[in-house]
Amino acid sequence: MKKKVRAAKKETPVDLIQKKPNAFAVGSIALLLGVVAGVLLIQQRMPPQTKDQKRRESTPSVMQNNNKKQGYTEYVMQENESLSDVAQRFYNDPNRYMKIAEENNILNPDIVEPGTKIKLYNLPQ
């Protein structure tokens, strides 16, 4: 007499998640960590300068505004330069960086991208 063999029921991904939710969570976290690690590695291997950065460096750092009524000088932020560096350079007061940020609607004065144009008002003569 022959034995009846049952065909194994194919489990769907939903069935597996319901049976082993912890294994699913661990697998998801591992996948996420792998993606983040990959992104970080790609960023490290990117060339140090892009065409956009080269274009910014060729931009003059200080451009005088021809309109005297406006009363400001336009300045282009440079690589590795902070607003307090600019405040020290133009106003001889590094603490004036908050005022520069307010005048230019900069939400986070600690992070200003190179190439950003800012307006400097009431420069000492």
Image: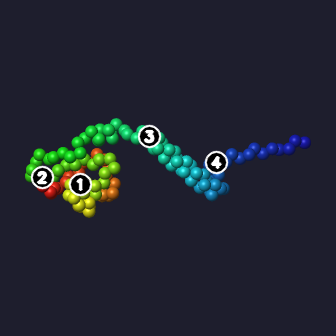
Q: Going from the N terminus, do you reach mark 4 or mark 2 first?
A: 4
Question: Given the current orientation, which residue lies at the most extreme bottom position?
Answer: 95
In this image, 35 relative to 123: left or right?
right
Q: Could you say which disc has been placed on residue 46 in the image?
A: 3
Query: Which-is-in-front pick, marks 3 and 4?
Result: 3
Calculate the distance from the C-alpha at mark 3 to the C-alpha at mark 4: 41 Å
Q: Mark 3 vs mark 2: which is more N-terminal?
A: 3
Secondary structure of the residue carrying tag 3 is loop
Q: Quadrant of residue 124?
A: bottom left
Mark nearer the viewer, 4 or 2: 2
What x and y, as percent, mark residue 19?
Answer: 66, 56
Mark nearer the viewer, 1 or 2: 1
Earlier sequence position, callout 4 versus callout 1: 4
Residue 51 seen anywhere in this rendered image of the structure: yes
* Label 2: which secondary element: loop
Q: CA distance from mark 1 to mark 3?
A: 32 Å
